[in-house]
Image: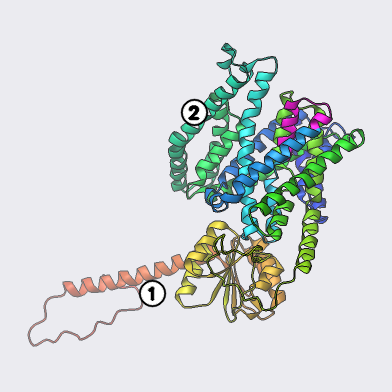
Amino acid sequence: MHHGPLIAIIVAGLGLAFVFGAIAQKLRISPLVGYLLAGVAAGPFTPGFVGDQNLANELAEIGVILLMFGVGLHFSLKELLSVRTIAVPGAIVQIGVATLLGLGLALLLGWNWTAGLVFGIALSTASTVVLLRSLQERRLVQTEKGKIAVGWLIVEDLAMVLALVAIPAVASAINGGQPGASSPLAAQFDLGLWGVLGFTVAKVAAFVAFMLIVGRRVIPWVLHWVAHTGSRELFRLAVLAVALGVAFLSATLFGVSFALGAFFAGMILSESPLSQRAAEETLPLRDAFAVLFFVSVGMLFDPGILIRAPWALIGTLAIILIGKSVAAWLIVRAFGRSNAVALTISASLAQIGEFSFILAGLGASLGILPAQGRDLILAGAILSILFNPVMFALVERLKLADGAARPKPESAPAAEPFAVPPTAAEAAPEPPAEPEHDITPTSLSNHIVVVGYGRVGSLLGAGLLAQGAKLLVIEDNPDAVETAKRDGAELLVGNAADPEVLAAAAVGRATRLFIAIPGSFEAGQVCQQARAESAALPIVARAHSDAEVEHLTKCGATLTIMGEAEIARAMLSLCGNMGAAAASKAEETALAEQPAASDDEQPPSTTQLPPADTPTAA
């Protein structure tokens, strides 16, 4: 049987991505670097296997759609509003500074201003994946600095979505004055650059209005209807159909990019209670196509740029690692935040990623960004992601040096945990330092630890709290975190498989540990880490199969409960109760049908019912 190039590129892409990603993980760097290097290995600029670039680009389009759908699903207006006074102006100013720096470098390289703007915009945005992973690894997501960084990133993502819309319009107006390159209707008129931009904005406005009026009602209704069918497969299919269908229709009917259509589909769905389930159901496919997207981007990279244009590459890295970082630091400090907050945000933004790849590919395909610019962006992305942990290490050293230079008074009073922050007039020149991490060791002892606060963990936790137990919950899902807070449990935000998180939960002083997460792999890690902390701790875990029961037992679980088995036992118990109820009803009926007793006959004082498993004559 003949195997076509589609199968070859998928197999080679995923296989090489796994190998290089595993190596990157082993070296403690982002797997994204491995995926990009896998693309370089499969590209036309290196010896060996060469994948079909056209097919890779088609697969990359699906990856872009699913990536943007995921960004929309996790778009949080609430988080943005909580830090809007610094994140919105800060991100806008930083994007402007980075764009101007990129434009300056482009003009020095002899490019035109259009190429320079695209180049600068591509260097101005950070990678969502890399930033969130860096914050999670350092347990900074729930701190002030983490919230500012995430809000900053949301503003950058929105700006890049607008750039993806504007760039094709600009390119169509510049390339021979043919605005119709982006719209058959606009081709009938000589609109010029501003006319094309206005027409594009009108189309985007029409699309946004359509999504807010029609999509906001239809999409959640469809998914709720599918969810009530009880078919998990059909629900997963419906979510994918919404993501891909809205993206395709937005491009076909409104001339809007796939990326913007997918982003709005995710954002509309994020308002539904089913958004978390939708994200979970589509995550495996989204990850797979995202990997192929990074591989396809790596295939575009020519390693020869390292030799042909070393100074241009050094300038590009200087903008990403130094220019953006210094701009972010100055902006955060100008808003009165501490040096520690400013340094952390600077390190978080000192890299580029997904949107930069998309912009580079878009600019090159439209002919407004030279191939050298695309190669510089790709090289800058790979190297900046590689250097990002180094930036965080440098930040830690700067924090230590800053702390040593400014020792705190010994008699400083302890801060109230729930104190209202002072007004600007009352604030000291240097605000009090916040905790470096969003994990604080608990002071509880003789308490119960519950890992996971989903459907099982929340029911368990609510029951324990109702009994007056001292409960500590370990959870990292934002929705489950809010549920645990509402229930009144003490909370640790993080991955329970992390030894530091379990140490902060004081499992050595706990009376019991309940592992309520469904994944046996991660649950096994939690068992092993907890058992290392305490050899006598009773550990109760959940499983879905005999193999998982065996695995968790080997990992140290004292008792493993298989959900399916407990459901069967409950059903059998219910059958027994139903039999007892039927026997009682039959006895009452038999007594009612007996003739009435005469005056000299005394009715029996009690009625002796047979056991539930004894047959009763009707």
Residue name at image x 19 percent, y 85 percent? 604
- Rate crowding at label 1 as few (under 14), some (14 to 19) or many (20 or more) other CA atoms within 10 Å: few
| SS at mark 2 in the image | helix
Q: Residue furthest right?
A: 307
Provide the residue designation for mark 1. 613
Q: Give the CA separation, mark 1 to mark 2.
A: 70 Å
Give the percent coordinates (x, y) of residue 273: 47, 50
- Give the magenta-colored segment's residue range: 106-123
Provide the residue designation for mark 2. 206
Q: Quadrant of the C terminus?
A: bottom left
Q: Quadrant of the N terminus?
A: top right
Residue name at image x 58 percent, y 81 percent? 446
Can see residue 454?
Answer: no
Mark 1 or mark 2: whose residue is earlier in sequence: 2
Give the percent coordinates (x, y) of residue 389: 78, 54
Residue 311, by quadrant, is top right
**Main secondary-structure element of the magenta-colored stretch:** helix
Residue name at image x 66 percent, y 20 percent? 172
Give the percent coordinates (x, y) of residue 10: 74, 37
Residue name at image x 77 percent, y 29 percent? 53
Which amino acid does the dot numbered 1 rest on? Asp
Observer-nearest of 612 and 138: 138
